[in-house]
Image (tube, rainbow, N blue to C red):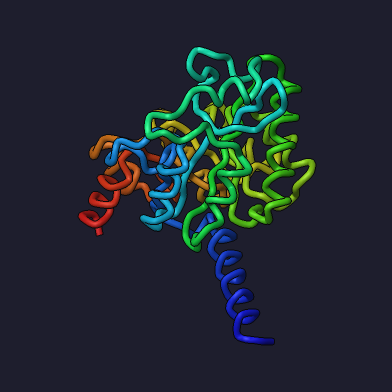
């Protein structure tokens, strides 16, 4: 085996170890829609994603929609420039640039960027529930999984969604990928029974149900909290030793973690 092949083998091994140990991580930072806020970058832009990777953050979250002509694109809201994404062709969305001059990115472009010079950052792929039908949302999820597998990024991608049936649809076609539920209406034991790996709830849900924190840990369910932007809330989550903390303020969270050491 030549030097280059050895390097590639050990790089791959490091990624497998890194991304298969989700439950062993503690208070790992996930940039919500990329690391955008401090440098005033567009949310979910390639630039914000790249910045999160360059900061070597443990995770960066992004949102997937499917256009009327079946393009998988990255955007948080259901609308883009007042156009409903699911009822608009991608070419029509491309008429409007992001604030930094970028075009609206596709999932394919996003994943290619996520693989480039990245040995640290988990790709946290949120599949948005369809506003047209539940079946459409599930198809979007399966299309996204197919793209990510084709690009050989499935080992360092996890999937999250507010739609429980989307996660169950993904589980049917992939028995190993990491899935986390966002809605906050199921206990860790319930999600474990459906082979969902994690509860990724708004931090207020865990304050309302503190017993779910220990329940998750006892059942080896990933604990993630969103979107934690205030120092006091960060400190509460840090003290309770979550696996991941999703935030719009990764730099502030990093400071709080250093103080808490």
Q: Quadrant of residue 202?
A: top left
* Residue under the image location 65 percent in, 29 percent down: 164
Q: Quadrant of the N terminus?
A: bottom right
Q: Quadrant of residue 259?
A: bottom left
Q: Position of residue 130 (x, y in %)?
A: 65, 21
Q: Position of residue 187 (x, y in %)?
A: 56, 34
Query: Does 105 sit above or below residue 57?
Result: above
Q: Nearer the viewer, residue 84 or 233?
A: 84
Q: Nearer the viewer, residue 2 or 57?
A: 2
Question: Is 55 on the left or on the right of 178, as rendered?
Answer: left
Q: Position of residue 36 (x, y in %)?
A: 35, 39
Q: Quadrant of residue 125?
A: top right
Query: Does 73 sit above or below residue 179?
Result: above
Question: Is 173 on the left or on the right of 23, as rendered?
Answer: right
* Residue under the image location 49 percent in, 61 percent down: 117
Q: Nearer the viewer, residue 153 or 129?
A: 153
* Residue under the image location 64 percent in, 54 percent down: 153
Query: Does 257 sit above or below residue 185?
Result: below
Q: Quadrant of the C terminus?
A: bottom left
């Amino acid at each position: 085996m030549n030097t280059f092949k050895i390097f590639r083998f050990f790089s791959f091994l490091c990624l497998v170890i890194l991304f298969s140990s989700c439950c062993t991580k503690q208070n790992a930072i996930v940039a919500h829609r990329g690391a955008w806020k401090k440098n005033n970058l567009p949310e979910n832009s390639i630039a914000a994603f790249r910045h999160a990777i360059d900061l070597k953050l443990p995770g960066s979250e992004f949102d997937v929609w499917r256009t009327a002509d079946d393009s998988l694109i990255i955007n948080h809201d259901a609308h883009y420039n007042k156009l409903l994404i699911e009822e608009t062709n991608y070419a029509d969305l491309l008429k409007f640039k992001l604030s930094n001059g970028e075009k609206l990115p596709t999932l394919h472009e996003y994943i290619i960027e996520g693989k480039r010079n990245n040995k640290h950052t988990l790709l946290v792929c949120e599949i948005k529930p369809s506003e047209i039908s539940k079946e459409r949302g599930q198809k979007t999820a399966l299309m996204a999984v197919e793209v990510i597998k084709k690009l050989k990024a499935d080992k360092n991608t996890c999937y999250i969604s507010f739609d429980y049936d989307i996660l169950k649809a993904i589980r049917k076609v992939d028995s190993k990928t990491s899935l986390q539920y966002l809605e906050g209406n199921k206990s860790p034991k319930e999600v474990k029974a459906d082979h969902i790996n994690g509860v990724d709830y708004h931090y207020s849900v865990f304050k309302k149900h503190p017993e779910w924190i220990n329940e998750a840990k006892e059942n080896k369910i990933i604990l993630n909290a969103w979107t934690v932007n205030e120092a006091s809330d960060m400190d509460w989550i840090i003290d309770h030793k979550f696996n991941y903390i999703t935030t719009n303020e990764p730099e502030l969270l990093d400071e709080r973690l250093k103080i808490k050491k």
